Amino acid sequence: MIAKKSLFDAYESWEQLTQAEGGAIQSGNWTIVAECQQAKQTLQKQIIHLTESAQAECIETGLDCKNFDRDLRPIINHLIAMETRNSELIALRRQAADIEKLDLDQASQNLRRVHKSYSPPTPAVWNSYS
């Protein structure tokens, strides 16, 4: 079953991309995260096509398609767990970024107050045109 082997290889590629994506999330390398997600988008189309081909092969050869599904389920469950982990990592990074932004906003506000307190007021300049 050529399509089944190709499908399993595609899922292995997905796993490698997801691992790379997780490392990039942890290190904050958003360029690599975007590249991994783009590659997975392309791979997703291939996986859909390969799944259809593998199912057709299964029917054509008279093999039990339940075995195909049974073989595929643990792989998919593992990938779902990896994707969930990456999603949780992104949520943690975002939460940390939100906290840092709040801190920076507070520091900016404090600096404006200090500047306002110690800067002499600028006199109003009136111009009259007759």
Image: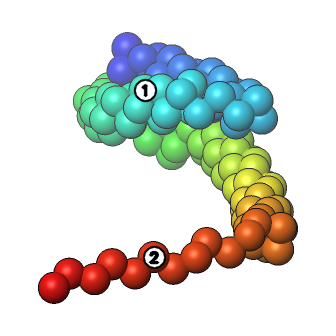
In the image, 5: left or right of 54?
right
Q: To which residue does mark 2 refer?
A: 125
What residue appears at the point 74 percent right and 70 percent down from the top-left corner?
120
Whether residue 110 is visible here, answered yes or no, is no
- Mark 2 or mark 1, earlier in chain: 1
Q: To which residue does mark 1 refer?
A: 39
What residue appears at the point 43 percent right and 26 percent down from the top-left corner?
39
What residue appears at the point 49 percent right and 33 percent down from the top-left corner?
34
Q: Give the image location of residue 11, x and y in percent.
A: 53, 28
The local crowd at label 1, few if under 14, some if 14 to 19, many if 20 or more residues have their Cα within 10 Å, is some
Residue lying farthest front? Answer: 130
Q: Nearer the viewer, residue 55 or 78?
A: 78
Whether residue 130 is visible here, answered yes or no, is yes
Closer to viewer: mark 2 or mark 1? 2
Please state, as top left, top right, bottom left or bottom right, where the C terminus lies in the image: bottom left
Given contact means CB atoms under 8 Å apart, are the residues at marks 2 and 1 in contact?
A: no
Q: Nearer the viewer, residue 111 or 96?
A: 111
Q: Give the image location of residue 3, x and y in percent.
A: 36, 21
Q: Nearer the viewer, residue 42 or 119?
A: 119
The local crowd at label 2, few if under 14, some if 14 to 19, many if 20 or more residues have their Cα within 10 Å, is few
Q: Give the image location of residue 28, x and y in percent.
A: 71, 34
Say which quarter of the image contains residue 62.
top left
In the image, 84: left or right of 13?
right
Residue lying farthest left? Answer: 130
Q: Amino acid at mark 1?
A: Ala
Q: Amino acid at mark 2?
A: Val
